Image: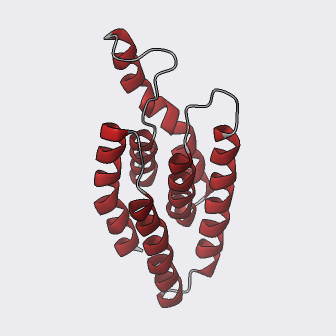
Amino acid sequence: MLPAFLLLAALGVPLAAVDLRVLRLPDPLVGAVAGGGLALLLLAAVADPAFPALGRALLAAALCGVGYLSLTLLPRSQLGFGDVKLGAALGLYLGWLGWPTVVTGVLLAPLVNLPLVGVLLVTGRAGRRTPIPYGPAMLGAAIVAVVR
């Protein structure tokens, strides 16, 4: 499983940087995180019979994807479809480690984003309707959930 998480770490940095700069999560990078992670976790499940972990990871990815999609479809939602795709991909990784890790990663993301939002609001660089990147917070929360 280590190669999968190293892939996430390697691609998470450019994903966060791009989202901070242009408020987009590029599909090729998110796809590499999701597809590469799935392939590497599948190899890990075969090498060290961990099929329950793989099943949990797939279910967590689906649930996180549906959850973020539901939030995105709410009126005046600041989330975009890149966030939905990244949420599903992160659900895959967090689900491999267990349900408490999934819950921690999902619930921690808004708290991780709070300081950025606060600074932007206080400095006048953002208003109530200004789009704010959420991908970096999702990635940061996932890191905290994994290493806790």
* Residue 10 x, y percent position in the rendering: 28, 62
- Left or right, 63 with respect to 32, comes to right
Q: What residue is shown at x 56% (from left), y 57% (from top)? A: 91
* Residue 21 x, y percent position in the rendering: 30, 38
Q: What residue is shown at x 59% (from left), y 75% (from top)? A: 54
* Residue 119 x, y percent position in the rendering: 34, 17
Res 28 quadrant in image: bottom left
- Left or right, 76 with respect to 111, comes to right
Which residue is at the front of the view, 116 or 79? 79
Q: Residue furthest bottom?
A: 47
Count all numbered tags in the image, as a single digit. 0
Is 33 drawn above or below residue 22 in the view shown? below
Is 28 drawn above or below residue 49 in the view shown? above
Which residue is at the front of the view, 50 or 138? 138
Q: What residue is shown at x 66% (from left), y 47% (from top)? A: 69
Q: What residue is shown at x 48% (from left), y 72% (from top)? A: 35
Which residue is at the front of the view, 107 or 70? 70
